[in-house]
Amino acid sequence: MAENILVSSINEWLADQALSEPDMVEMFEGLCNRLYGVGIPVSRARLTWPTLHPLFQAETILWKRGGETEFEQFIHQETGSEAWLQSPMKHMMEYDLSVIRRRLDGPDKLLDFPILQEMQDMGYTDYLVVSTDFAKEEKSRNSKRRGIIVTWCTDRPDGFSNREIESLQKIQRRFAVACKTVVQARISKNVVETYLGAQAGARVMSGEIRRGDGSKTNAIVWYSDLRNSTAMADTMPGDEYLNLLNDYFECTAGPVIEAGGEVLDFIGDAVLAIFPFEDANQKETAINNATTALRASRIAHDSVNQRRNDAGLISFKFGIGLNVGSLMFGNIGVPHRLTFSVIGPTVNEVARIEALTKIVGDNILVTREVAQLDKSAWVSLGEHTLAGVSQKVELFTFASEDISTSARVLGKIDQTFEDQKLNGVN
């Protein structure tokens, strides 16, 4: 009877979920509630799936009967934790198993994993783990298992019946079809946003994938560049230089993202980012956000370099330029290899503004449009000629009272490579 109800109700519902764009948490919660509603005595269930994300290794949803459903993400390092190494799921993956079942009560109980004792202490009597792969393909040595794993628990005194376990396995296969659509969409979104940024990624995902697709936009444009990168790359071991680059990006790209900006590209050791706006109010907000990112960048610079110095590593410095204007935001390249970026005079100018930081000695330079929003925070350095620009541009840097106790910290740090007398400065 329960099997007939499952086929006629839950399977139809799952087919609708697979054809739509369901929320993963709501879909799993709905499945568990429906299973309990048709007589499968599920008391607790956890859905886990691997993801492709720079921060997270896996995502999981925990459902408890009568409780609030919880979503959680596990960082990459946690896969080496003691809890993971002693878990049934680790055992399942290591021995390529699709089902693990343990009775937690009665004469047939078996508590051979630490988590099982915890489940018994919580009052559960039966523990079932079912793995459903998305693709039955030959696995290479380095390939990662793709699919879902669900742990099903009950607190019914006699546990799950064999028929109920069979029903759970069948329904999970159908549930996996709907999950595959959602998981693959989440992974695609993660990858696109990681490599293109949130705004550019959303536009690409919405269909702007042809060369020339794009539009004109207004934005605060950020350009930062690492100092003496050629000398460091030539003299430092590769892994040390890579770590230095990531520390530098932490001080530049990190504050931009935290302040609501969009990092569009890492051009070697340069960072190109924008704070878009559409009207006067949004422009003011964008300038405030960009200025917040500048201050945060300076603070991060001090903190990261102090940490590096304490560890016996060389410190670094960089320049930042801000410009305001219109630009083209879209696809450029060749039909088979595109990048989503910004182009136009505003972008060219901001790169030249940043280059002037090497000459004027102030490592943050912004145009009048940025500075005029809070005149007390900025001081004019006069008008300067930008390469390729006919008219001189007035540039500003933070006023001395805004620099804090380190007084122009970006320009006065350890200059290990300053004495190397390079012909050019990167």
Image (tube, rainbow, N blue to C red):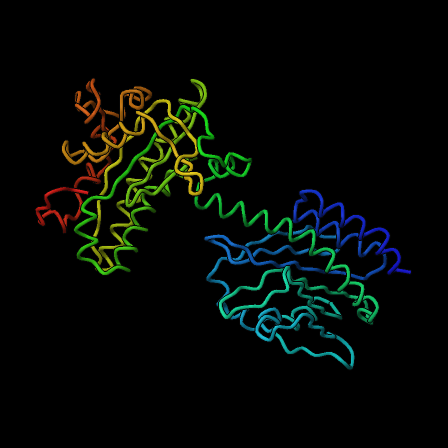
**Split into 4 quadrants, where in the image is the N terminus?**
bottom right
**Split into 4 quadrants, where in the image is the C terminus?**
top left
Image x and y of residue 185, in percent:
59, 47
Q: Is residue 192 left or right of residue 384?
A: right
Q: Is residue 189 above or below residue 374?
A: below
Looking at the rendered structure, the number of numbered marks drawn on it comes to 0
Image x and y of residue 168, in percent:
77, 63
Image x and y of residue 398, in percent:
24, 29
Q: Is residue 105 above or below residue 27?
A: below
Q: Is residue 119 left or right of residue 240?
A: right
In the rendered image, the residue lying farthest to the front is 335
**Residue drawn at 61 percent across, 56 percent down:** 60
**Residue drawn at 45 percent across, 21 percent down:** 278
Q: Is residue 410 left or right of residue 271?
A: left
**Residue drawn at 20 percent across, 30 percent down:** 400
**Residue drawn at 46 percent across, 62 percent down:** 77
Nearer to the camera, 252 or 156:
252
Image x and y of residue 129, in percent:
68, 67
In the rendered image, the residue lying farthest to the right is 1
- For residue 108, what is the image quadrant? bottom right
Q: Is residue 362 above or below residue 385?
A: below
